[in-house]
Image (cartoon, grey):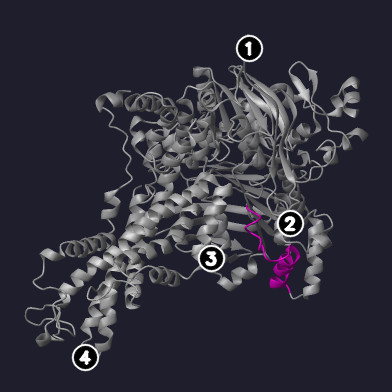
């Protein structure tokens, strides 16, 4: 029995390019992104730099307004909700950032930092908030005494534990991890990943796990969405997607990852994708990947492929996998 | 929670003022003591000293320091130098401290508003400050002092106006860098209202560079105030701040150098002390320094 | 302490017992503590470790690029029988670039933003070889073509900010190989790059190294990169080498508990959520106050009393395989 906790429908966002003058082109950071998140599920969001994954995270959390599209949390409209309704819905979805130290207020002790969301939401009195912060400190593997210290006294991995504690204090249903383990060393990264997985089991959380590292994403996710130049080009169950990617970009990404086993992969086995990623300032016509694609069709250079449903739970935005009806529709 | 039971948790401390870190900085402590002493003497001027600073005594002109009854000597009118320095400090410190505090409050408000609101508010505030900024500092002070009648009040107003753009710009720059920090985004994601974020996140993180800067400015403003007095735009005789004392003494520089040198040394010492104090405060206000 | 004898390839660079300290003699930090390694022609040696393990400081120490208050306090760095530690600054300048090429992690800060990339590569050539400016520039264009920069003649006139991260790294590689050095030191060359770009840069480095029959010292934290690139691997932890082996042994028969634990930490794309993740508990030691004995002992699940009593020496346990662990010869179970 699954319950849809989060619905993201048709989110798009453009920024004005830096620079001055009348002819500033808008840069499309996120284009027409839709997905859902079930209760207890982890959706991995993977893509290379500039693909719009961090912008998407901010849109989903309603930290920046979308140009179009909307986000629904458990049936309640989040994107254009009134101020009070929005504030209440924020309790249900929290975020953990890449740079843990800068995500903590340097002038507040760790305890105050962790309790801060309760205070901002006006929940509980000082003693209750402190109690809650202490409980979470232990839950994320730190000591109660650490509440009195300042963030800069902790290592990167410990700061990330503190940031996770803060994200959990409002008892959210959903936590978004935006490259939350990318800056950490391998051994510390594994500690944090284990903590994140344990917390999910204990608390029944749903995660959106954003990373450029497909290995990490695969490790924690039930489903994976692959982004390229502002769009989700493929989404599907993690195992299936990694075993048999449908979209040529997802395939190129997978083949470029070095595997930590010299018997299975050496440098000559690494897949070399054609060309370089197109710029979001000046995206190509048609499919954004077509210039780098080894299997492009005539239509790829002119039309943007819609997201096609391929098999249960699997969709891709590629004409190779479009049903004839769908490709006709796209050609119109 | 066993640790919590053994020792009941104390309330979270917000150690913005960390005296321990400050105490280790001997230069800052010495500076603070010097300023407290001079400030205290200025405040208590009517109660201390045996002499009236304005009382001339033609029989005792140009007494050198160490003269009986006048430990710092007398000036060309036979007025007691110590009394004049103490009373002069009342004006000089007033002119150094009050405009800086006023300008810091106004500049901080304007700068944070501009940096936080951005857009048209930012444009208007910053263009107005730019206009003030475009005038040379002393010229602007002269203009203001020239329009209003010369006096301490005018001096305070003119120095305040001169300082606002300096503080405002710094506050805006600091705000712009603070608002891009992930902890602001985390607070927004937690449902913090713009006002709460402004007061609990932006202000505390912008405040300490402003406090440090303002402390340094106080020393500079004593010099500027002295300069205005020197030009005759500040306090009017017979009241004399330290700058006016330097100006008065210069005609008799060869005959009685102490009349000029003593207030000059005091100005130098006080402005240096404010600088050391500012450095000490910077370390004390930032939890990232001092401990670890 | 003799390094493991390695079959194939003659020695290009021999580093013995290198020690580098930052800060004062007492209370300073020994960032590199007795590192020995041998680079052979035509082979790639990987130096792998987490941040603070001393792998980058090792490279800088070899190059004579440690800035005061840091100092190389012991050891030898032999290049063709010559100890680089006794070389003058001027001699080292002649060696860097000509005999040893370097590629750094951040290609943008390593390039001068005010000069065209063609002239920057030409500058390297002019610094080491008596050629005309025109000849040097022509060679810069050829080098850019060689490292895969399309339309090289035109792009040589561009400035660094016109290039993408991957292209900038190609430019740096072109500069590093401009004088055909026998040794290339690459310090985290792909860490700042996207994975599809990383694959191309790794391939380029590999192909160039093969073609020039050079030795490549690859410094990285990424075990995937190590597995695909390295012939020999040294695992560093808190300033010391804990294990040294050929790449196959290191990944398939590692002996040091740290190496084994590190391999258990990687999130590979084949592993799914049900496979248990085995993190190493605890934090790396503070080098200002290092633990006694083996530096990994406080985090090691196999540690015994001996581990904190003395420092285990790097001992050869098989041909080309050495381990610094008292329990290396025991069959330690996976926990």
Figure check: A311 above or below A264: above
Residue C74 percent across, percent down from the top left: 47, 60
Instruction: Report the mark closest to the observer, 2 or 3.
Output: 2
Residue wearing tag 1: A2
Query: Toward the viewer: A97 or B102?
Result: B102
Q: Which residues are magenta?
A: C106-129
| SS assignment at label 4 | loop
Question: Which residue does the numbered mark 4 point to in the structure image?
Answer: B255
Q: Chain of mark 1?
A: A
CA neighbours of label 2 inside 10 A, class few (<14), some (14 to 19), many (20+): few
Cα–Cα gap, marks 2 and 3: 39 Å
How far apart are the two marked residues, 4 and 1, measured between alpha carbons?
98 Å
Report which residue position mark 3 lands on: C85
Labelled disc at residue C246: none
Q: Same chain, marks 2 and 3?
A: yes
Q: Which quadrant holds residue A213?
A: top right
Furthest residue toward left: B68
x and y, in percent, of residue B85 in the image? 20, 73
Q: Are marks 3 and 4 on the same chain?
A: no
For residue C162, the mark is 2
Callout 1: SS: loop
Q: For the residues tagged 3 and 1, is the chain the same? A: no
Disc 3 or disc 1, which is closer to the eye?
A: 1
Question: Alpha-carbon distance for marks 3 and 4?
Answer: 67 Å
- Marks 4 and 2 sit apart, C-alpha to C-alpha, by 70 Å
Which residue is depicted at the point 28% across and 63% down?
Answer: B94
Which residue is painted at 37% across and 49% down in the image?
A: B286
Residue A28 appears left or right of A186: right
């Amino acid at each position: 029995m699954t319950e849809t906790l989060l619905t993201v429908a048709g989110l798009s966002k453009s920024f004005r390019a830096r620079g001055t003058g009348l002819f500033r082109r808008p840069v499309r950071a996120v284009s027409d992104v839709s997905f859902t998140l079930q209760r207890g599920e982890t959706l991995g969001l993977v893509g290379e730099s500039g693909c719009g994954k961090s912008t998407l995270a901010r849109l989903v959390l309603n930290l920046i307004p979308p140009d179009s599209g909307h986000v629904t949390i458990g049936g309640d409209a989040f994107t254009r909700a009134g101020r009070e309704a929005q504030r209440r819905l924020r309790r249900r979805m929290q975020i953990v950032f890449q740079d843990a130290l800068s995500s903590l207020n340097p002038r507040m002790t760790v305890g105050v930092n962790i309790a801060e969301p309760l205070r901002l939401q006006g929940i509980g009195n000082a003693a209750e908030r402190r109690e809650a912060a202490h409980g979470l400190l232990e839950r994320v593997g730190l000591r109660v005494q650490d509440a009195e210290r300042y963030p800069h006294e902790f290592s990167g991995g410990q700061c990330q534990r503190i940031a996770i504690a803060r994200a959990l204090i409002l008892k959210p249903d959903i936590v978004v991890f935006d490259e939350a383990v990318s800056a950490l060393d391998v051994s510390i990264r594994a500690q944090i990943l284990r903590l994140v997985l344990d917390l999910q089991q204990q608390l029944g959380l749903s995660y959106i796990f954003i990373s450029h590292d497909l290995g990490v994403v695969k490790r924690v996710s039930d489903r994976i969405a692959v982004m390229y130049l502002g769009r989700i080009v493929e989404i599907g169950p993690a195992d299936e997607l990694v075993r048999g990617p449908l979209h040529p970009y997802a395939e190129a990404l997978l083949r470029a990852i070095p595997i930590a086993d010299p018997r299975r992969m050496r440098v000559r086995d690494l897949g070399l994708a054609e060309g370089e990623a197109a710029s979001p300032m000046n995206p190509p016509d048609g499919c954004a990947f077509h210039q780098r694609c080894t299997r492009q069709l005539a239509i790829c250079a002119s039309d943007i492929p819609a997201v096609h449903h391929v098999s249960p739970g699997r969709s891709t935005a590629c004409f190779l996998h479009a049903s004839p009806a769908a490709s006709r529709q796209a050609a119109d | 929670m066993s640790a919590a039971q053994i020792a009941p948790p104390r309330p979270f401390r917000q150690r913005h003022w960390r005296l321990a870190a400050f105490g280790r900085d001997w230069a800052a402590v010495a500076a603070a003591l010097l300023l407290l002493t001079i400030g205290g003497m200025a405040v208590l001027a009517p109660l201390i000293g045996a002499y009236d600073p304005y009382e001339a005594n033609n029989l005792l002109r140009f007494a050198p320091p160490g003269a009986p009854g006048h430990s710092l000597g007398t000036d060309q009118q036979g007025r007691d130098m110590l009394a004049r320095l103490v009373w002069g400090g009342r004006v000089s410190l007033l002119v150094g401290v009050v405009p800086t505090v006023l300008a810091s409050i106004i500049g901080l408000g304007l700068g944070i508003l501009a940096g936080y609101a951005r857009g048209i508010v930012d444009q208007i505030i910053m263009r107005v400050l730019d206009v003030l900024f475009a005038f040379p500092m002393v010229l602007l002070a002269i203009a203001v002092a020239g329009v209003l009648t010369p006096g301490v009040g005018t001096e305070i107003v003119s120095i305040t106006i001169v300082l606002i753009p300096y503080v405002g710009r710094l506050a805006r720059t600091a705000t712009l860098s603070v608002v891009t920090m992930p902890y602001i985004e985390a607070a927004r994601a937690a449902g913090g209202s713009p006002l709460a974020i402004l007061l609990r996140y932006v202000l505390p993180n912008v405040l300490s560079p402003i406090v440090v800067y303002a402390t340094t400015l106080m020393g500079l403003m004593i010099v500027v105030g002295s300069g205005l007095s020197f030009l005759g735009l500040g306090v009017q005789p017979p009241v004399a701040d330290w700058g006016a004392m330097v100006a008065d003494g210069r005609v008799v520089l060869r005959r009685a150098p102490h009349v000029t040198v003593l207030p000059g040394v005091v100005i130098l010492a006080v402005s240096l002390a404010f600088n050391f104090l500012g450095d000490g405060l910077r370390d004390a206000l930032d939890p990232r320094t001092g401990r670890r | 302490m003799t390094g493991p004898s390695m079959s194939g390839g003659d020695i290009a660079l021999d580093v013995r017992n290198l020690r580098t300290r930052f800060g004062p003699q007492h209370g300073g930090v020994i960032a590199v503590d007795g590192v020995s390694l041998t680079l052979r022609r035509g082979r790639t040696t990987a130096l792998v470790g987490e941040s603070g393990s001393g792998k980058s400081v090792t490279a800088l120490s070899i190059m004579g690029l440690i800035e005061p208050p840091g100092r190389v306090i012991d050891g030898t760095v032999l290049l063709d029988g010559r100890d680089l530690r006794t070389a003058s600054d001027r001699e080292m300048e002649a060696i860097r670039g000509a005999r040893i090429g370097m590629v750094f992690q951040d290609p943008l800060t390593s390039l001068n933003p005010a000069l065209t990339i063609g002239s920057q590569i030409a500058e390297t050539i002019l610094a080491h070889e008596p050629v005309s400016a025109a000849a040097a520039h022509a060679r810069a264009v050829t080098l850019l073509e060689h490292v895969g920069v399309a339309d090289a003649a035109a792009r040589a006139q561009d400035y660094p900010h016109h290039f993408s991260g991957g292209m900038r790294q190609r430019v740096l590689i072109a500069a590093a190989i401009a004088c055909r050095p026998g040794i290339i030191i690459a310090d985290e060359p792909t860490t700042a790059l996207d994975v599809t770009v990383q694959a191309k840069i790794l391939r380029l480095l590999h192909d160039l190294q093969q073609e020039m029959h050079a030795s490549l010292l690859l410094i990285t934290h990424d075990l995937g990169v190590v597995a695909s690139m390295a012939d020999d691997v040294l695992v560093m932890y808190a300033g010391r080498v804990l294990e040294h082996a050929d790449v196959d042994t290191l990944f398939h028969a590692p002996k040091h508990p740290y190496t084994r634990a590190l391999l258990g930490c990687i999130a590979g794309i084949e592993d799914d959520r049900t496979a248990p993740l085995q993190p190493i508990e605890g934090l790396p030691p503070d080098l200002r106050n290092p633990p006694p004995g083996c530096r990994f002992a406080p985090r090691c699940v196999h540690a015994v009393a001996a581990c904190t009593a003395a420092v285990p020496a790097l001992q050869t346990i098989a041909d080309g395989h050495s381990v610094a662990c008292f329990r290396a010869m025991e069959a330690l179970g996976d926990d």
